[in-house]
Image (cartoon, helix red, strand yellow):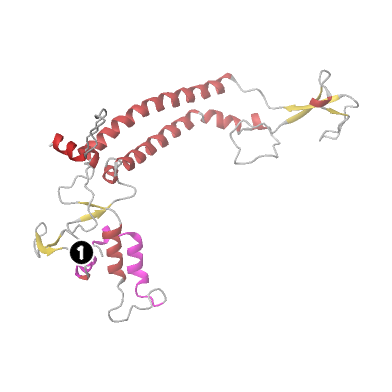
Amino acid sequence: TSVCRGRIMEKEEGHADKWLDQGNAVCSTETIDLHSRRDKESSKTWTRKFVERFLMNRSWYFPRKDKNNGPDLSKAYAYYEHFTLSRYLTNSDDDVHNTIRADPWEARKTELYNPFGTSTSNLGEFGIGVGLYFTMLRILAIILIIAGLINLPNIIYYSSADYKGENNNNFNWTTSGNAICTQKEWLACSNCDEENGRINATTPEGWTKGWEIIVERNACPRPELALGMANYASLIFLVMCFFLLGRYEKQREITLDEDKQTAQDYSVVVKNPPPEAYDPEIWREYFS
């Protein structure tokens, strides 16, 4: 059983900004009931809104809705949103760009983290690794989108009829835009041996080359220099971005670490301890 260590705070009637201390907050029915009554419609999850509006009074969804002392879906959702989902402390002077993560037992005014509006700087409240992960994920997405735009002329050319051919029957949207050539042609090769060609073979067009050695080759046109330069430009762009990204990641790690206190901040590392100093009491006395 979880114990809510905060204080129950409720607004005084007639005073929008004044809160009354209602005593110690515990994970009891009264606490959950307070949350279920105090939660605004705009602060609820969409599933909770849908259940409370349309499903809670349906016997096929909630068979025990008319039972005395039966379960209460509103309180259940209030418990889920206040003690399971992550929330942050908020007030009238709240800075949306610098929120503090609330404890599960927090009884002060809190809000759910917005999955679309929460900035990556606030994710450092979940740990340095989480903040770095989503920061790098966003930056990598932007970098790859820009690299894709640099290669957009190549994608357009390789998916056009100029490269694939007017009567291309082998079109596949999963390979559209790449340099796979689907146009083939058969030619006689006087300098080829039997291992590299076909003798007296019938081509798909229905004609033969007698006893000559014939080979199949790509009939797509040779790409222009500008297409290759676009590839080089995207490659250089990615190399520069990943170099700068590595330096930014180190600086970002320092910033997130300074905003969040962890056990590492109070740890001491001794790199050259004496061989005989293995008693923890000696080290405790030394650093005291």
Could you tell me residue 2's position as x and y percent?
24, 62
Which residue is label 1 attached to? 38
Give the residue displayed 81% in from the left and 21% down from the top: 192
Which residue is more in the foreground, 52 or 156?
52
Left or right: 135 with respect to 219?
A: left
Count numbered badges in the picture: 1
- Magenta region: 30-59
Instruction: Please identify the quadrant where the N terminus is shown.
Output: bottom left
Which of 280/171 is in front? 280
Looking at the picture, which amino acid does disc 1 mark? Arg
Position of 5 relative to 143 (above/below) = below
Above/below status of 129 relative to 39: above
Q: Is the residue 50 above or below the residue 208 in the image? A: below
The x, y position of residue 92, in whole percent, is 15, 51
Name the image quarter holding the C terminus.
top left
The kind of secondary structure the magenta stretch mainly shows is helix
Q: Is residue 57 magenta?
A: yes
Q: Is 110 left, or right, of 183 in this rendering?
A: left
Asked which quadrant contains residue 77, the reply is: bottom left
Image location (x, y in percent) of residue 133: 36, 40
Identify the residue shown where x is 27% and y is 79%: 69
Q: Name the image quarter holding residue 271.
A: top left
Q: Does residue 62 appear to the left or right of 24 in the view shown?
A: right
Compared with residue 275, is residue 9 higher up or lower down, i.e. above or below? below
